[in-house]
Amino acid sequence: SKSNTMDEDDRGKVRMLISLCVDALAHFLHYYCRDTSPRVTLAHLPEELRQRVFVELIRYYNKPMRYISSDNTTHQPSDEDKTRAVSLFLTPGLRELPLRKSPWLTDDAFKKLDCPLLDYVSFRQCVALTDRSAISLANSCHAVRELHLSGCGLMTDVGVEAVARNCPALELLRLNGCRNVTSQSLLVVAEHCPALTDLSVSRCRKIVEGVRAIATHCTNLQCLDLYLTRDVTEALIVEVAQSRSTMEILYLSQCKKVTSAAVVEIAKNC
């Protein structure tokens, strides 16, 4: 008799069918999001399905393409359409917010953010986002563990401080290229985020005191990215190496003030 369980080939076909359905739903969802009250229906979708549709929708929006509507006319969604669509997915059950490389995204998407379970957020290279988005995140999403802000040039110490004070479970913080973020906010991170294990401040400026404080107070720090951080000194690197035996990865490329002597000291202590 035939087994009632699916073999691997059947499971593969089911996965492909699910993917096709998700793609189709995401492809046309921006029309649906123009409705006056789609949030209620989205909230009743199973969380896993809603998350997958959300990821596909963002993927579509980040491509230079037009969409064919039911009347066979083409439509290029405006930045306002895209931002509103994102806001409709911000339901209380959301756990991941993968919005990297979305230059059209604005702070308006996060005006009514209410996602208490959210633990992963990527705003990487969302160049239009400002401190307003970070503050909205900090006010309602206290479970965030990973936050990617690299390439968000409009973010400042104000937004990073708000996150640090309200997200004590933060483990990973990426601030690469955030040139308006300084030691002022990193000192707050050191005080309020003891679980931090991964910090990236590549191409940031005026961060020496903040990095020193994080190396001292964040006792689980394992990865520190200081690539092309020009004010990092050899004395700082030696101090970090001596205080943090937990360090596993330390990026120092293009740190002009760091010599081989500091590297030897790192090797002794890490």
Image: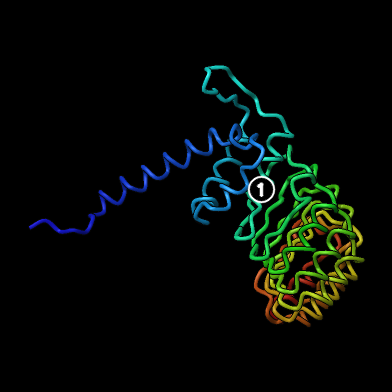
Residue at 77 percent of width and 54 percent of height:
176
Residue under the point 70% across and 68% down: 198
Q: In front here: 227 or 160?
A: 160
Vertical arrangement, residue 35 with respect to residue 201, above or below = above
Q: Decide: is 63 above or below 235.
A: above
**Residue 188 lies in what quarter of the image?**
bottom right
Q: Where residue 173 sits in the image (x, y, percent)?
A: 73, 63
Place of residue 204 in the rendered image (x, y in percent of width and height, measured from the top left): 84, 56
> Toward the viewer: 55 or 207?
55
**In the image, is residue 137 above or below residue 61?**
below
Q: Is residue 108 above or below residue 72?
A: below
Identity of the residue furthest to the left in this view: 1
Q: Is residue 268 something one can see in this rendering? A: no
- Identity of the amino acid at label 1? Leu
- Residue matched to label 1: 99
- Name the image quarter holding the N terminus: bottom left
Q: Nearer the viewer, residue 22 or 215?
A: 22
Residue 222: image quadrant is bottom right
Q: Residues within 10 Å of mark 1 (few under 14, many from 20)?
A: many
Residue 230 in percent (x, y) is at 87, 57
| SS type, badge 1 | loop
Nearer the observer, 183 or 4: 4
